[in-house]
Image (tube, grey):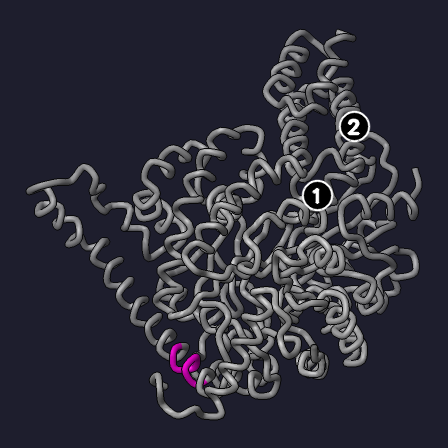
């Protein structure tokens, strides 16, 4: 089984989807501990993340890795007794595409990369009204809020969201990062965010800097 | 104006502006820096219209465009009606691929947005490749518009011949098909109304001396597969799961895509093709994936358009700096590469003597900056990217909807001051 677990990690990180899912199935059928199996998946995801950071992998690989993780997770999770789950998280990140904007590819990739780096991510989805961000911050108390937007209309929506967070007295304890489309230093200042990022690696390194493991 | 008639101030300006643009495209030094106005909703906003009004009020939009053109005096422009004024037609069709202002959940002042989804299943690849027109008619159009669902009942004509052609007419009299056809006629009449206003405006602007710089639109094969057929997730997974099917489809698209643009440009009496790209940028694909799934097929499309005497204006969305060494391989003086976030100075190094560059005043600067910052930026672009010609000034992906008027005015004014 030791060999098989190594093989599984390698198959996932080398994008061999069919083989990886088949092997995971075999391992579970042979009684392999589902919690340990998911641990191997996490290990593989870390390798995928590293390869993405190093410029070897790109969005298609992250997308496929996500699919493998989901397929194996769907097989393993029903076999896990409830209290066995609940891995420790490094911190909580709240993320969403701001009001008026329906784009989500960037946000989803950032979410995926943060999750494989050990963060708990609460994803509010797309076209998120300002008040939903405020309410969710009160409820989940995230250390970092990520505002995503592809369209230029997002600049004002981000500005209004950050303003509302401030008005609600939640700004001081919350780091805010913006990303997507055409954001840059000028828009960081314009919106009042703490930082901006051009890709998912930037989001991860900002969170690591603000909420170290 | 017919050939040989007396020159008017407008016709003189038109010839000067067109020459300025063509000098840049064909890599000569023009008299001064040419500029193009490309906007979706900025012109509407500039004149106090809502985004929804811009999509529904053809005449109001024409007034707004005319005012913006007269105020800014760009050397060329992309017709706006074709890019936004299809609200009434979408209502008639019960269109499903877009969300637009005032429709369902979107506010009045939000641009229309494409809904990324799977519009062709992986098992339909072969069907599309074998009979693309049949697939579009029987499956695709019914999926993207509620009113077109009954088109799925139309006969499959390759197998309908001789007296069966006569018999096949029965299908058109079925109540639901009849309703779909009547709706299509209504939608067609609505589109003709819009087109009539647009054509009249294009002529008016021509009389005022402004050439249009987009006579048709075309696409990269991978974008068609990813945006319009498989959806972004499906397309990305297909790089692994359905690689051969995808490559086969892309090959087919290199042949299917160009004729539409060539015919449309001919009908519009022009030679400039707008080609917006969505999947070519750095970070989306690896260099190897780019040279396998994107560039070779797109290059073929470009070459076909060029052979037909057309000038593609390729909008390379995002940052494409790492692609420059690959994409420079096109015949010199034919294409315009319109960059959004690509490093313009590196682009000039790579593309000098090959491709005219267009762009790229940042959206952030036009929205949140000052006229002085805009002027400084434009001058710097002119000095470096404009060196030796081959440069057209524009914003990153056109003028953003939320740009401050004074910043946009500064951008176009600056082009007039940048003399060679």
| N-terminal-most mark, 1 or 2 | 2
Tell me the residue at 17%/53% (across/down): B172
Q: Element type at marker 1?
A: helix
Residue B266 position (above or below residue B367): above
Residue A30, compared with residue B318, is above or below; it is: above
Q: Which residues are magenta?
A: B199-204
The residue mark sitting in front, 1 or 2, is: 2
The residue nearer to you, when weighing B257 against A188, is: B257
Q: Secondary structure at mark 2?
A: helix
Crowd class of label 1 (few under 14; some 14 to 19; many from 20; radius 10 Å): some
> Looking at the image, can residue A10 be seen?
yes
Kindly give the residue lying farthest to the left in the view shown: B163
Disc number placed over residue A109 in the picture, else none: 1
Q: The residue marked by circle 2 belongs to what chain?
A: A
Drawn side of residue B195 relative to residue B380, left or right: left
Residue beneath the point at 74% across and 69% down: B381
Q: Which mark is residue A38?
A: none
Query: Which residue bears the numbered disc 2?
Result: A47
């Amino acid at each position: 089984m030791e060999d098989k677990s190594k093989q599984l990690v390698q198959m996932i990180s080398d994008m061999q989807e069919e083989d990886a899912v088949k092997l995971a199935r075999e391992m579970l059928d042979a009684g392999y501990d589902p919690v340990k199996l998911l641990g191997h998946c996490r290990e593989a995801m870390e390798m995928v993340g590293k390869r993405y950071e190093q410029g070897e992998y790109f969005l298609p690989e992250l997308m496929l890795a996500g699919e493998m993780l989901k397929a194996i997770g769907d097989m393993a999770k029903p076999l896990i007794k409830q209290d066995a789950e609940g891995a420790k998280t490094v911190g909580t990140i709240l993320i969403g595409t701001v009001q008026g904007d329906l784009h989500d590819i960037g946000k989803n990739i950032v979410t995926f990369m943060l999750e494989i780096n050990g963060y708990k991510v609460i994803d509010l989805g797309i076209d998120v009204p300002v008040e939903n961000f405020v309410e969710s911050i009160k409820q989940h108390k995230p250390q970092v809020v990520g505002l995503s937007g592809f369209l230029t209309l997002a600049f004002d929506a981000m500005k209004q969201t950050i303003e509302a967070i401030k008005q609600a007295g939640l700004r001081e304890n919350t780091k805010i990062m913006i990303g997507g489309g055409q954001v840059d230093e000028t828009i960081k200042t314009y919106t009042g965010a703490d930082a901006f990022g051009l890709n998912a690696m930037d989001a991860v390194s900002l969170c690591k800097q603000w909420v170290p493991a | 104006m017919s050939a040989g008639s007396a020159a008017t101030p407008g016709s003189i300006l038109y010839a000067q502006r067109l020459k300025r643009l063509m000098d840049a495209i064909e890599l000569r030094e023009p008299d001064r820096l040419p500029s193009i106005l490309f906007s979706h909703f900025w012109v509407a906003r500039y004149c106090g219209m809502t985004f929804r009004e811009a999509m529904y009020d053809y005449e109001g939009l024409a007034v707004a465009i005319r005012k913006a053109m007269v105020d800014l005096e760009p050397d060329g422009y992309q017709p706006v009606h074709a890019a936004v004024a299809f609200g009434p037609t979408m209502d008639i069709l019960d269109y499903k691929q877009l969300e637009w202002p005032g429709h369902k959940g979107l506010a009045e002042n939000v641009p229309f947005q494409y809904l990324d989804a799977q519009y062709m299943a992986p098992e339909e690849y072969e069907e599309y490749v074998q009979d693309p027109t049949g697939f579009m008619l029987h499956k695709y159009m019914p999926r993207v518009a509620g009113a077109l669902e009954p088109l799925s009942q139309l006969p499959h004509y390759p197998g309908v011949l001789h007296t069966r052609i006569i018999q096949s007419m029965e299908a058109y009299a079925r109540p639901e098909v009849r309703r779909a056809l009547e709706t299509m006629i209504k939608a067609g009449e609505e589109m003709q109304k819009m087109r009539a206003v647009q054509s009249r405006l294009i002529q008016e602007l021509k009389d005022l001396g402004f050439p249009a710089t987009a006579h048709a639109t075309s696409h990269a094969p991978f974008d068609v597969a990813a945006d319009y057929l498989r959806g972004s997730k499906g397309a990305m997974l297909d790089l692994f799961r359905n690689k051969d099917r995808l490559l086969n489809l892309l090959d087919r698209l290199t042949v299917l895509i160009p004729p539409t643009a060539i015919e449309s440009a001919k009908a519009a009496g022009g030679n400039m093709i707008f080609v917006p790209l969505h999947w070519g940028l750095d970070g989306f694909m690896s260099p190897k994936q780019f040279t396998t799934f994107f560039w070779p097929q797109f290059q073929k499309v470009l070459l076909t358009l060029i052979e037909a005497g057309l000038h593609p204006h390729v909008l390379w969305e995002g940052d494409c700096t790492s692609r420059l060494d690959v994409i420079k391989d096109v015949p010199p003086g034919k294409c315009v590469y319109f960059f959004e976030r690509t490093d313009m100075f590196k682009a000039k190094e790579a593309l000098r003597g090959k491709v005219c560059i267009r762009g790229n005043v940042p959206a952030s600067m036009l929205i949140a900056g000052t006229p002085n910052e805009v002027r400084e930026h434009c001058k710097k672009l002119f000095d470096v990217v404009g060196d030796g010609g081959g440069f057209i000034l524009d914003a990153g992906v056109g003028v953003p909807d939320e740009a401050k008027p004074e910043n946009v005015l500064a951008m176009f004014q600056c082009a007039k001051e940048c003399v060679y």
